């Protein structure tokens, strides 16, 4: 007989439930009570539902857990169950009887376990049932122990693979036109700018005179005109040589026409250059020079100077060259510290030198005991980038290496056997010495598979025989008392 299961909602009332019952075409209606419904718990509500079920010719039962609803259903003789499964297992007639319902329920359960009349009952039925229980318990216990033996033990295997060294000598070329290396021995190079600065001083090797006093003397000024001339103080007279020596009159004088007068003069610049001999050619500057003639019947004297140490012009050139050479050596040392220049240096001389700042002290020859220079210079060099060099070296060494061994990347090194030679086409030719350390290739998954499920001694023996090792493997179990390595390779960690 088909049963219609109707799940009630917390907002359903008697009217809505009767409508849902009317739509059903089944002869048995099982109403599943919601966990919270305040409107369906009175005796009248349940009587109305039971009456409607009789009117439509259907049998009614409840699945409910509320104690008050269970009590009313029992009083009305409506079958009530704790679950849908229980409603399918227990006949509704037994569940619906109000008296002795619990006893009838137990009787019904007992009868379901009893074989039907007419079938022979094996005498060993009870003992067989107990045996099955024991068997199932034993299988469960064995499965649990097997799960523990697989999941709980863990092991670590420490290996020391065999190592050996590998060296390779190659003639290669480096070209700036390449982006990456070529396995045939062509490497990509690039230009890198290294900026360095420094300061250096040298003793001054020259001398320079220091003027101490100006020369003075007497000149005779002759008026070439017939009119009286006023000659102001400071009127300048100069010599005919180049550069000329200039002298100034010390006082103003009035000079009648066609007459002469003696006037005191002094050199404008101190030093011995103002000590003129007698009768040196002199002329008057300015408009008065057309009207006056000048002569020094006696020599000028009194000009004095002192010689002092000072940088010579050659000192500037030699200091610049020495500091540039020192900065170039410093740039070569800094190539390894510059991330952009990391790699193999090819330049033995700078490709280009750019002076960014130059400060001489003193800036030009003048009294000083030493000459100092501060330079900031950019040197352009050519390098093979480290990543290119390592990639090329590892590739060619892998091709030439022994089978069963792999390179240790951190051990790779490359050096130049001879000085790189720059060709006319701008390429560099050089011979490289490549070296690295090798170690035996060991597959961690293979190691775990070989050792899984074995005792530590058995695993050591198997691994020592199967692998290239420097020494016997070291095996550590997380459970010291456990006799075997884990059965699952994933529970075994391999370190090298």
Image (cartoon, helix red, strand yellow):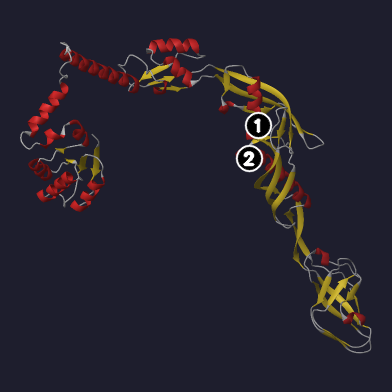
Residue 334: which numbered mark, if any?
2
Nearer to the camera, 461 or 438:
461
Q: Secondary structure at mark 1?
A: helix
Please give the residue where the numbered disc 1 appears in the rendered image: 389
Left or right: residue 354 versus residue 72 is right
Image vertical order of residue 233 relative to residue 423, above or below: below
Q: Position of residue 293 (x, y in %)?
A: 92, 79
The residue shown at (24%, 18%) is 136
Q: Which comes sooner in the sequence, label 2 or label 1? A: 2
Residue 468: which numbered mark, if any?
none
Left or right: residue 83 versus residue 360 is left
Nearer to the camera, 132 or 467:
132
Q: Is residue 10 visible?
A: no
Q: Residue furthest left?
A: 99
Q: Position of residue 220 (x, y in %)?
A: 89, 78
Left or right: residue 223 versus residue 407 is right
């Amino acid at each position: 007989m088909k049963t219609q299961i109707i799940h009630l909602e917390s907002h359903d009332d008697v009217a809505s439930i009767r409508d849902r019952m009317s739509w059903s075409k089944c002869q048995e209606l099982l109403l599943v009570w919601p966990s919270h419904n305040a409107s369906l718990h009175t005796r009248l509500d349940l009587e109305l539902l039971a009456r409607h079920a009789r009117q439509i010719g259907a049998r009614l039962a409840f699945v409910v857990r509320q104690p008050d609803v269970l009590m009313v259903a029992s009083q009305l003789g409506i079958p009530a169950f704790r679950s849908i499964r229980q409603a399918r297992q227990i006949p509704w007639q037994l569940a619906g009887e109000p008296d002795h319902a619990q006893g009838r329920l137990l009787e019904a359960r007992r009868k379901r376990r009893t074989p039907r009349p007419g079938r022979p009952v094996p005498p060993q039925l009870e003992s067989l049932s107990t045996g099955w229980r024991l068997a199932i318990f034993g299988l469960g216990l064995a499965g649990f122990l097997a799960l523990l033996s697989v999941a709980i033990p863990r092991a670590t295997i420490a290996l020391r693979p065999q190592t050996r060294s590998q060296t390779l000598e190659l003639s290669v070329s480096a070209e700036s036109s390449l982006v990456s290396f070529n396995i045939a021995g062509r490497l990509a190079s690039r230009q890198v700018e290294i900026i360095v600065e420094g300061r250096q001083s040298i003793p001054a090797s020259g001398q320079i005179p220091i003027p101490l006093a100006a020369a003075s003397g007497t000149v005779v000024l002759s008026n070439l005109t017939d009119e009286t001339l006023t000659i102001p103080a400071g009127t300048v007279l100069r010599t005919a040589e180049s550069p000329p020596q200039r002298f100034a009159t010390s006082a103003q004088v009035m000079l009648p026409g066609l007459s002469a007068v003696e006037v005191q003069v002094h050199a404008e610049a101190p030093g011995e250059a103002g000590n003129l001999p007698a009768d040196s050619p002199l002329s008057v500057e300015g408009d008065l020079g057309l009207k006056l003639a000048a002569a020094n019947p006696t020599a000028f004297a009194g000009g004095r100077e002192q010689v002092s140490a000072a940088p010579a012009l050659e000192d500037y050139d030699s200091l610049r060259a020495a500091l540039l050479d020192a900065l170039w050596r410093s740039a070569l040392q800094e190539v390894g510290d510059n991330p952009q220049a990391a790699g193999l240096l090819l330049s033995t001389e700078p490709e280009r030198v750019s002076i960014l700042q130059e400060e001489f002290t003193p800036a030009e020859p003048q009294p000083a005991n030493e000459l100092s220079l501060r330079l900031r210079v950019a040197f352009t060099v050519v390098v093979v980038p480290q990543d290119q060099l390592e990639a090329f070296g590892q590739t060619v060494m892998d091709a030439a290496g022994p089978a069963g061994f792999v390179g240790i990347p951190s051990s790779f090194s490359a050096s130049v056997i001879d000085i790189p030679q720059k060709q006319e086409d701008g390429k560099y030719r050089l011979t490289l010495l490549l070296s690295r350390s090798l170690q035996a290739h060991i597959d961690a998954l293979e190691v775990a598979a070989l050792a899984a499920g074995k005792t530590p001694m058995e695993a050591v023996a198997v691994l020592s025989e199967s692998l290239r090792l420097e020494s016997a493997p070291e095996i550590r179990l997380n459970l010291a008392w456990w006799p075997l390595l884990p059965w699952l390779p994933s529970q075994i960690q391999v370190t090298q």
